[in-house]
Image (cartoon, rainbow, N blue to C red):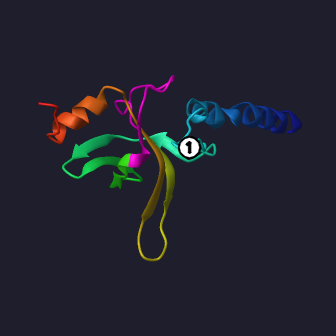
Amino acid sequence: MCSSTALIAIVLAVSLPLPLQAHDIYSHLKDKSGASCCDDRDCQLAPYRFTVNGVQMLVAKRWIDVPSEKIQYLAIPGDTGETGGGHWCGLAYEPSGGASYLTRCAILPPQSASVQVEWLGVSGQ
């Protein structure tokens, strides 16, 4: 019995750091004022789309509007490409009045900056 308990403890000890290691791809991200985008748990992969009103990201199974001042266009080392380069950092909570979202940082791949300009019909021509 003791050996199975020890084995379980070892497995748990080895597996606990994995979520933190996966979150390490976000540890270097800073917002425009220099504050960290995440606190080791509030960044995640997020599909994104362009609308006539701006960018939306899929967070907690809901498309939310992302404030343009929170968007950064950069490649994140370690990104696996599952969302085409979209990442969202912030807080999602559900007070009694419904779901609310506070975006700290929204990361889109660098090439999407020109796509957004084209989508919104804002061109230099």
Q: Residue furthest left?
A: 125
Q: Residues within 10 Å of mark 1 (few under 14, many from 20)?
A: many
Q: Position of residue 47 (x, y in %)?
A: 34, 40
Q: Amino acid at mark 1?
A: Cys
Quadrant where the C terminus is found in the figure: top left
Q: Residue furthest front?
A: 125
Horizontal arrangement in the rendering, residue 76 relative to residue 61 (left or right):
right
Q: Is residue 22 visible?
A: yes
Q: Which residue appears at 18% of the width and 49% of the height?
A: 52
Q: Which residue appears at 73% of the width and 30% of the height?
A: 14
Horizontal arrangement in the rendering, residue 19 relative to residue 96 (left or right):
right
Q: Position of residue 39 (x, y in %)?
A: 63, 46
Quadrant where the N terminus is found in the figure: top right
Horizontal arrangement in the rendering, residue 86 relative to residue 34 (left or right):
left
Residue at which label 1 appears: 37
- Residue 70 falls within the magenta-colored stretch: yes
Q: Which residue appears at 17% of the width and 34% of the height?
A: 118
**Region rendered in magenta:** 69-86
Q: Position of residue 9 (x, y in %)?
A: 80, 37
Check the image and report above or below for 79 versus 9. above
